[in-house]
Image (cartoon, rainbow, N blue to C red):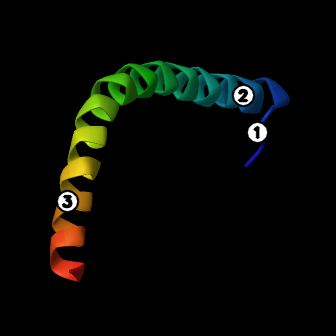
Amino acid sequence: MVTTVAVITADITAVVKNVIAAKDVTAAGAGFFNTGASKQQKELKKLSSFFVS
């Protein structure tokens, strides 16, 4: 099976584009989820301090 450099490069480019697109989505999602996550962390800290005491 012979794979040309062009085909490999095209595959890599496609993967990189997908990763970049995914990062954009992830960044947008992360901003949204971080607000919820920080609230959850505060709740978890309250719970853990309750169980520890």
x then y, percent, for residue 49: 24, 70
Residue 15: where, in percent of width, then height? 59, 30
Residue 17 or 7: which is nearer the viewer?
A: 17
Q: Which residue lies furthest to the front in this view?
A: 53
> Dot 1: within a 10 Å radius of its alpha carbon, few (fewer than 14), some, or many (20 or more) residues?
few
| Residue position marked by numbered label 1 in the rendering | 3
Residue of label 2: 7
Q: Are marks 2 and 1 in contact (CB under 8 Å)?
A: yes
Residue type for callout 3: Lys
Query: SS at mark 2?
Result: helix
**In front: 32, or 15?**
32
User: 10 Å neighbourhood of mark 3: few (<14), some, or many (≥20)?
Assistant: few
Residue sitting at x 58%, y 20%:
17
- The residue type indicated by label 2 comes to Val
**Which mark sits nearer the N-terminus, 1 or 3?**
1
Amino acid of disc 1:
Thr
Q: Residue at x 29, y 24 (%)?
A: 32
For mark 1, give the secondary structure: loop
SS class, disc 3: helix
Q: Is 24 situated left or right of 2 in this image? A: left
What residue sits right under mark 3 in the picture? 46
**Camera-nearest label, 3 or 2:** 3
Quick check: 49 above or below 12? below
The answer for how far apart the CA atoms under marks 1 and 3 are is: 58 Å
